[in-house]
């Protein structure tokens, strides 16, 4: 699926994947399976902005909507542990590496470091 209209890259139902019961291991595994991964909540405006940014750049992120997964709350807690703060979504991984929340992504975009990260991860070719 491509980023057109209301489509945001690839949505993969987390409940269909066998990643064990440990939420942290599950986050790490899912984050490493695609070039760009966004952990999101479907009603979050900041998540929408993150998805829009990547799609506007020609990147098709893999998006995991935590509010649509039975174990989403556990995953949110694991993400909070990774970040060390209370903001849990959107959380972006590029090339399996934690970039952070939208503020970090936007700062990287503004200072010119986001595009090289995307190219290195194979998410962007131009």
Image (spheres, helix red, strand yellow):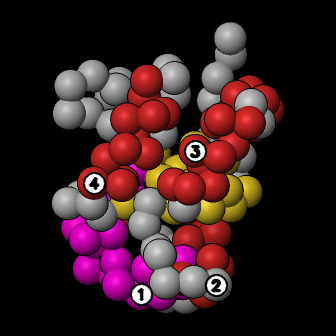
Q: Which residue is mark 3?
A: 106
Q: Tell me which residue sits at (48%, 39%) in the image.
A: 61
Closer to the chain start, of discs 3 and 4, is 4
Asked if residue 103 shows in the view, the reply is yes
User: How would you rate the neighbour count of disc 1 (Cα within 10 Å): few for under 14, some for 14-19, many for 20 or more?
Assistant: some
- Measured in 3D between alpha carbons, the distance from the residue under mark 3 to the one under mark 4, in whole angstroms, is 15 Å
Q: Which residues are magenta?
A: 63-79
Instruction: Check if mark 2's residue and mark 1's residue have beta carbons within 8 Å.
Output: no
Estimate the x, y position of residue 118 in percent, counting from the top left.
Answer: 69, 33
Q: Which residue sits at x=27%, y=22%?
A: 4
Mark 2 or mark 4: name the one nearer the start of the chain: 4
Q: Would you name the residue on which mark 2 appears?
A: 84
Which residue position holds label 4? 45
The C terminus lies in which quarter of the figure? top right
Q: Secondary structure at mark 4?
A: helix
Q: Check disc 1 and report its element: helix, strand or loop.
A: helix
Q: Is residue 99 left or right of residue 48?
A: right
Q: CA distance from mark 2 to mark 1?
A: 15 Å
Task: Give how far across and how far down residue 88 sits, in percent.
Answer: 46, 74
Q: Tell me, yes or no, if residue 20 can be seen here.
A: no
In the picture, the disc for residue 3 is none
Q: Which residue is mark 1?
A: 74
Tell me where residue 40 sits by quadrant.
bottom left
- The N terminus is located in which quarter? top left
Q: Position of residue 22 (x, y in %)?
A: 55, 88
Q: In the image shown, does 99 or 23 lie closer to the viewer?
A: 99
Q: Earlier in the sequence, mark 1 or mark 4?
A: 4
């Amino acid at each position: 699926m491509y980023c057109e209209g209301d489509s945001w890259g690839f949505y993969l139902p987390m409940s269909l994947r066998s990643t064990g019961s440990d939420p942290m291991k599950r986050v790490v595994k899912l984050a490493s399976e695609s070039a760009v991964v966004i952990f999101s909540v479907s009603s979050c405006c900041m998540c929408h902005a993150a998805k829009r940014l990547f799609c506007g750049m020609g990147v098709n992120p893999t998006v995991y909507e935590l509010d649509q997964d039975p174990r989403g709350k556990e995953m949110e807690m694991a993400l909070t542990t990774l970040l060390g703060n209370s903001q849990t979504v959107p959380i972006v991984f590029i090339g399996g590496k934690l970039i952070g929340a939208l503020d970090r992504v936007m700062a990287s975009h503004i200072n010119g470091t986001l595009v090289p990260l995307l190219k290195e991860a194979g998410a962007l070719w131009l």
